[in-house]
Amino acid sequence: MSHPSESIFKAVQFYVTAAYPCSYLPRHEARSQVAAPSHLIGPEVYSALVEQGFRRSGLFTYRPHCDACHACQSIRIDARRFQPTRTQRKTARRHSGLVAHTTDLHWDPEQFALYDRYQKQRHPGAGMDEDSRSQYTQFLLASRVDSRLVDFRTPDGRLVMVSIIDILKSGLSAVYTFFDPEAHGSLGTYGILWQIAQCRQLGLPWLYLGYWIKESRKMRYKSRFRPFQILTDGVWTEPDVESL
């Protein structure tokens, strides 16, 4: 089994899960490589793991480790060199009146209600549309790293979007974002633009967006934020976007 070899990981173990149905490619099976035990994966270790293609879901730190498929590719946006497209500039202007409030992770019934509506309308039948309070808490509010919760509200105080982000040594990691499923104007795109702006404000070079899958319509939006890098064989490189 391959695993990171830096000394920072000397107390961390890595194992591979059994196969399970892939969430992104129909008729595919997936496996994950998991870093454990979770209580040893603090901010420094996690930052180094993200550099090697891992991300987290709650206390679960993993990366794809499929037997015969390499479709999932880690992607990060170059925040310093990022240039928004005309459409992205329009989206930023449309939502420029939203007020962002950043806090530590915490339970909030209003945010959970928005999450529930988002899952039921955007991802019906995917299992997450039936999440209970405890499942939501384990998925988004459990963390042993430097995590923040950001809620976005209209000037009159209406909640329209929530983002969970991790602060790393080299950037921010976008954990999850959910928003009003009936809102217009690409709130998800605005959320990423806001996170890129935060990277710049904090002097951090990268925004990590998890995994990009060329064959998945759900994932294609990530490659619209340019320039970006893909992790290939342990090395971050900037691809020729014309070939994608």
Image (cartoon, rainbow, N blue to C red):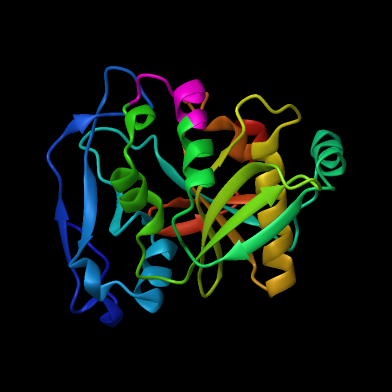
Q: Is residue 24 above or below residue 58?
A: above
Left or right: residue 95 compared with residue 199: right
Q: What stretch is highlighted in magenta?
A: 117-126
Q: Is residue 128 above or below residue 175?
A: above
Nearer-the-camera pick, 143 or 64: 143
Nearer-the-camera pick, 145 or 87: 145
Left or right: residue 169 compared with residue 160: left
Left or right: residue 42 compared with residue 180: left
Q: Can residue 222 be seen in this view?
A: yes
Q: Is residue 41 above or below residue 22?
A: below
Q: In which quarter of the image is the N terminus?
A: bottom left
Which quadrant of the structure image shows residue 90? top right
Residue at the farthest bottom position: 7
Nearer-the-camera pick, 12 or 37: 37
Residue at position x 64%, y 38% in the image = 188
Report x, y in % for residue 15: 14, 56
Report x, y in % for residue 153: 71, 47
Q: Is residue 36 above or below residue 244?
A: below
Residue at position x 67%, y 65% in the image = 199
